[in-house]
Image (cartoon, rainbow, N blue to C red):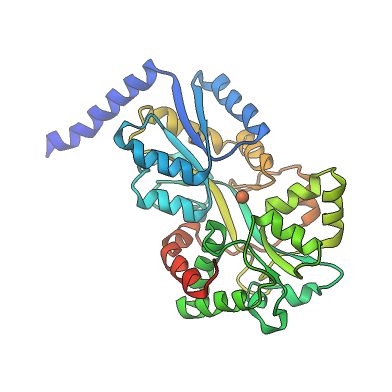
Amino acid sequence: MKRLSLLPLLACALASVAAAQEPVLNLYSARHYQTDEALYQNFTKQTGIRINRIEAGDDQLIERLKSEGANSPADVLLIVDAARLAQAKDLGLFQPVRSKVLDDRIPAELRDPQGEWFGLSSRARIIVYNKATTNPADVASYASLADPKNRGRVCTRSGSHPYNLSLISAQIAHLGAAKAEAWAKGVVANLARKPQGGDTDQIKAVAAGECGAALTNSYYYARLLRSAKPEDREVVAKTGVVWPDQAGAGTHVNVSGAGVLRHAPHRDNAVRFLEYLASDEAQVYFADGNNEWPAVKGIKVQNPALAAMGTFRVDPLPIATLGRNTAAAQKIADRAGWR
Ligand SMILES: [Fe+2]
């Protein structure tokens, strides 16, 4: 008994020595925003820990970690969406972290109960509509996108994309699997065109009148709102935003998040980095860099686009619940033909 309980302590002590010897953090990040530079430089200034960064798409980073296995040099994985965070967790890529700072600052509904990942910023899945052709009252809820009155008027990217898988996951949590599947089939029946492109392509198709309404993550619309390009100004002028389900469960939100990797060579530095990302200063940079909201409550971001979009009631469903429903959501997307 005694020997067993001493082993983890010894491992911790050794890890601390290793970390002290090498003030380095290897970060695999799916983020690539200008403001992140300042974020990482400030961490190095405060701690003396240098950050080596590998940037790639979320799926590429997960594939890379799978193939590197125990030899991976990576300490932290930073990716977006509950569906992908759950995938990384299910693959056993993360290790649990208990940190009073993270537990105190990151709301429980935005992090993994086992401490394998922590949400650092949030985004909403909203509905954008064409002001000339569509009454916002007709597209005020996710359910309305499946209503026969919107036949041939809805645009969306593939149902297999993590953003839509998480939305289907939320529908499963609220309605049960059978009704969630009926909803997905209703959305597919209402499509104006075969799912194609990303969220920004859907917003542009709405502005062009190809569809009356579309699903998009909030930051894509905020990015257009902040753009000075004449073609983006035109898209914004022709479209409006609905916060879905304000009369129901609230608007579906998701997170950007990070976790410490199972084979992290610099575990202590990794935890320090996550704690730093939860600090007031880092939260502002982190969220604002992609027009998102800070995960930590009570932090104000001076973002004109988010301010212009207004406030809304959030669906309080825990993000970890979405992750647990992802596999069922994928089956629903497949059966509904939401490709
Ligand atoms: Fe995105």
> How far across and how far down the image is residue 120, in percent?
55, 44
Q: Residue at x 54, y 66 (%)?
A: 339
Q: Residue at x 84, y 72 (%)?
A: 133
> How far across and how far down the image is residue 147, in percent?
66, 81
* Residue in front for this viewpoint, 86 or 281: 86
Please determine whether, in this image, residue 193 is positioned above or below residue 292. below
Please determine whether, in this image, residue 310 is positioned above or below residue 9. below
Q: Residue furthest bottom?
A: 148
Left or right, 213 with respect to 332, comes to right
> How far across and how far down the image is residue 17, in percent?
32, 19
* Residue in front for this viewpoint, 315 or 91: 91
| Image quadrant assignment for residue 26 | top left
Specify the quadrant that holds the N terminus.
Answer: top left
> How far across and how far down the image is residue 152, in percent?
70, 77
Q: How many discs mark residues in the rendered view?
A: 0
Q: Residue at x 38, y 29 (%)?
A: 73
Left or right, 242 with respect to 325, comes to right
Q: Is residue 4 visible to us here?
A: yes
Q: Residue at x 75, y 77 (%)?
A: 138
Q: Is residue 311 visible to us here?
A: no
Please determine whether, in this image, residue 150 is positioned above or below residue 293. below
Please determine whether, in this image, residue 337 is positioned above or below residue 38. below
Left or right, 252 with respect to 109, comes to right
